[in-house]
Amino acid sequence: MSAYYLEIAYIISVVMFMMGLKKLGHPQTARTGNMQAGIGMGIAIIATLFLYKKDGVGIDMEHYGWIAGGILIGGIAGLLAAKKIAMTAMPQMVSLFNGMGGACSAFIGLIEFGPAIGGDVITFSTVLSCLVVGTLTFSGSMVAFAKLNGNLNKDIRLPFYNILNTLVMVIIAGLTICLLLDKIDEPIMWIYILFGISLVYGILFVIPIGGADMPVVISLLNSLSGIAAALAGFIYSNNVMIIGGILVGASGTILTIAMCEGMNRSLTNVVFGAFGGGGGSGTVTGADGIAKIVKETSASDAAVMMNYSQSVVMVPGYGLAVAQAQHIMAEFQQMLEANGVEVKYAIHPVAGRMPGHMNVLLAEANVEYDKLVEMDDINPKFPTTDVVLIVGANDVVNPAANTDPQSPIYGMPILEVSQAKKIIIVKRSMSAGYAGIDNELFFDDKTSMLFGDAKKVITDLVGELKNM
């Protein structure tokens, strides 16, 4: 009878997962969706603890203490992290979650390898796949975390890294096949070798990928963590793990494809192209060798320009997140609207360091969702826009994507802000963006640079409006 109630609990959990996932697609319902998915997971955990039986025997009572201890430690760590994590560090948090999910699946593969030896091929291949996918997801996610967190700032380009990566991949496939065909003596030793090689491959897989491609990498690793969880579910014949993993894997894959389309790049090009790692120079010159001129403006002049405009489009980027300026930016938007200015936000699909980063950031500041306009919808409106205010965005507005065939971002769809009547760019300095290339927009005749920390600059703009 307990098996009957367990399956009912799993069905409820799966339904809540799907409802939560659907609501995550809209900023106004994302928080509710996250809560629903969390409750669904809670139901699945509790049901498993008290209703699961194997051969009529449930979990040994002496194990409940260890399980409770693990839940308590994990729950407290998760709660503290969620409370203290800054919005700027959210991409790192996502990478860490992906890595922990992969690590769990890898440990399941290691634990279940011994009992699977000599069993049916399907179970054995599932264990090996779970081990490999989980392990490379873990090590790859840790490298992504280090890159996003600033612990791994220096670009690492191993000689012939594509050949090296392919060679390691072939070794993993060959070793896995040999284990499946029982062609190796002492398989326990070789499983740890496979584990080590998979760890190395995850590092080699992510370490050459440049910063501009990190949103794609994060969504891809998220997909792999879901696949690893689904494989673990197959090992234990646990339906909620299977379906939950498939949901994560499928949504991560769809998101990866969407991110690639947003950059006009194939997934193969992202993985093997190592885009975004070049270093941009601090000086840009024209074809005649003469240095281009940068025009600087003041908060007072910028505030006057926007206050007496009919339409303003704000373009948020990672610099906005770093400065934690989303709340003051929302206040500035409201003040402009109170003065009769139409204000919209232009959202590029890969702005920030993870998919949807800007949407989450602005939702935190209670910006109305209908003011967030996607790239394809806002681009036709730029020619009639009076002023574009760019805060912390760089590569996603760089005209080199359209004009310079030698640029690594050439062909990437961008926000066509250069077509606006006036452009104001808020930046700390003239430094290059995450792709490591100079931005031609800085030197456009219509562009004025407003240097400084984004939060302070926009606070100054708000102060200027109040004094008008």
Image (cartoon, helix red, strand yellow):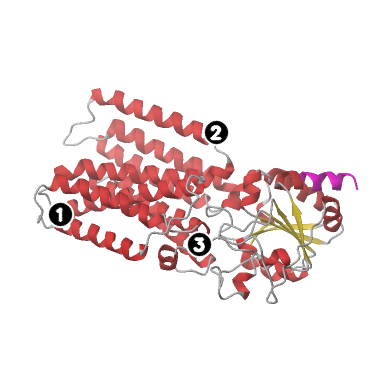
Q: If you read the primary sequence from the N terminus, does the residue marked by circle 3 or circle 2 appear first?
A: 2
> Residue 83 shows which numbered tag?
2
Asked whether the beta carbons under mark 2 and mark 1 sit within 8 Å of each other, the answer is no
Which residue, given by chain and number where applicable, does mark 3 sit on?
259
Query: From the viewer's perspective, is residue 425 above or below residue 107?
Result: below
Count of residue discs: 3
Q: Is residue 399 visible?
A: yes
**Mark-to-mark CA distance, 2 and 1:** 45 Å
Q: Nearer the viewer, residue 130 or 342?
A: 130
Q: Dot 1, crowdedness within 10 Å: few (<14), some or many (≥20)?
A: many
> Which of the two marks, 1 or 3, is nearer to us in this view?
1
**Mark-to-mark CA distance, 3 and 2:** 29 Å
**Mark-to-mark CA distance, 1 and 3:** 36 Å
Question: What is the span of residues highlighted in magenta in the rendered image?
Answer: 459-468
> Residue 179 shows which numbered tag?
1
Q: Dot 3, crowdedness within 10 Å: few (<14), some or many (≥20)?
A: many
Taking the image as shown, residue 406 lies to the left or right of residue 122, namely right
Within the magenta stretch, is there residue 355?
no
What amino acid is found at the position of numbered circle 2 in the picture? Lys
Residue 72, located in which quarter of the rendered image? Answer: top left
Query: From the viewer's perspective, is residue 400 above or below residue 102?
Result: below
Query: From the viewer's perspective, is residue 221 above or below residue 407?
Result: above
